[in-house]
Amino acid sequence: MSRTTIPDLYEKYEGGEPLTMLTAYDAPIAAQVDAAGVDMILVGDSAGDNHLGYDDTLPVTLDEALSNAAAVVRGTEEAFVVADLPFLTYGTSTAESVENAGRFLKEAGADAVKLETAPYGETTIEIVDRLTELGIPVQGHVGFTPQRKQEIGGAYVQGRDTDTSSSGEAIVETARRLAEAGAFSIVLETVSEGVAREVTEAVDVPTIGIGSGRYVDGQVLVINDVLGLGAEPYSLSKQYADLDAEIRDAVERYVEEVESGAFPTRDNAFDPIDEE
Ligand code: KIV
Ligand code: NA
């Protein structure tokens, strides 16, 4: 099988089949996600709190993100790989945005980049226009945008209010402009279900929801939340495994066996010495 393309994704989308997406930040986990048949892997800046030990996404550097993306690409064969552009690596100027986004394709081998857009965020909408004109596919991201969490004031549901910048109308209109600018898909994060459905009806590109309910074209979750690995899970996620417990158990048994002399045995030695 060869690498999934945007036309492959659109074939599924146009056939009414839900698209699947999960994050990954390193080669071995990405390899399992890929082998299990996920359509898209997001090398999210959620690496900040899920992979790199930061409190949130803001400190993630361009070099860290490039390194994670390259590892995920090396570890996979089929999934379409989307790389998140870290905080302030885009939007500062068009030239810098293009140069930084381009590195994810040219150096890391990613298939597309993703960037966050604030309600009516003209600067980033223009950047999506420029990047896609140049051949860098972009996935949009609206609703709760974690890079703006200081400004938003917390991980609040977006689209509930009627008269603020986070209104449902603002989210629908921002998504519409992103699609017009050339985004091939749009992530909706923590958006009320009715607004997510409105966006999905308003745009002719696949919407990918996280904590945004049922009426979207696909779903994305953070792999650590799905696997029960490390960081505090997102409240609307679903946990399918308990890797923390599995890892702790395995390591405790290893420590016990080394300390008791049960490991290593003769089978773990090259040219073992046969004692009298
Ligand atoms: O970084 C990330 O994991 C994301 C998803 C939550 C969409 O942007
Ligand atoms: Na992200």
Image: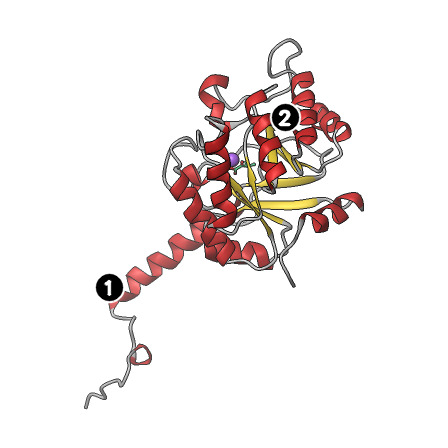
Q: Foreground: 96 or 87?
A: 96
Residue at point 27%, 86% (across, down): 271
Residue 110 as seen in the image, left or right of residue 65: right
Most distant residue in the bottom direction: 276
Q: Position of residue 118 (x, y in %)?
A: 56, 22
User: Considering only vertical position in the picture, is 261 above or below 165?
Assistant: below
Residue 168 as seen in the image, left or right of residue 156: right
Coloring applied to the structure = secondary structure
Amino acid type, callout 1? Glu
Dot placed on the residue nearer the N-terminal end, 2 or 1? 2
Q: Residues within 10 Å of mark 1 (few under 14, many from 20)?
A: few
Residue 262 as seen in the image, left or right of residue 186: left
Q: Residues within 10 Å of mark 2 (few under 14, many from 20)?
A: many
Residue at point 57%, 37% (across, down): 237
Amino acid type, callout 2? Val
Q: Foreground: 226 or 148?
A: 148
For residue 214, the mark is: none
Determine whether the beta carbon of the residue marked 1 sits less than 8 angstroms from the nearest atom of ligand 1.
Answer: no
Q: Quadrant for the C terminus, please.
A: bottom left
Residue 224 visible, this angle:
no
Q: State yes or no: discs 2 and 1 in contact (Cβ < 8 Å).
A: no
Q: Which residue is label 1 attached to?
A: 259
Tell me how far mark 2 sits from mark 1, CA to CA. Answer: 51 Å
Provide the secondary structure element on which disc 2 rests. Answer: loop
Q: Quadrant of residue 33?
A: bottom right
Q: Position of residue 72 (x, y in %)?
A: 49, 52
Most distant residue in the left direction: 276
Q: Quadrant for the N terminus, please.
A: bottom right
Q: Which residue is label 2 attached to?
A: 191
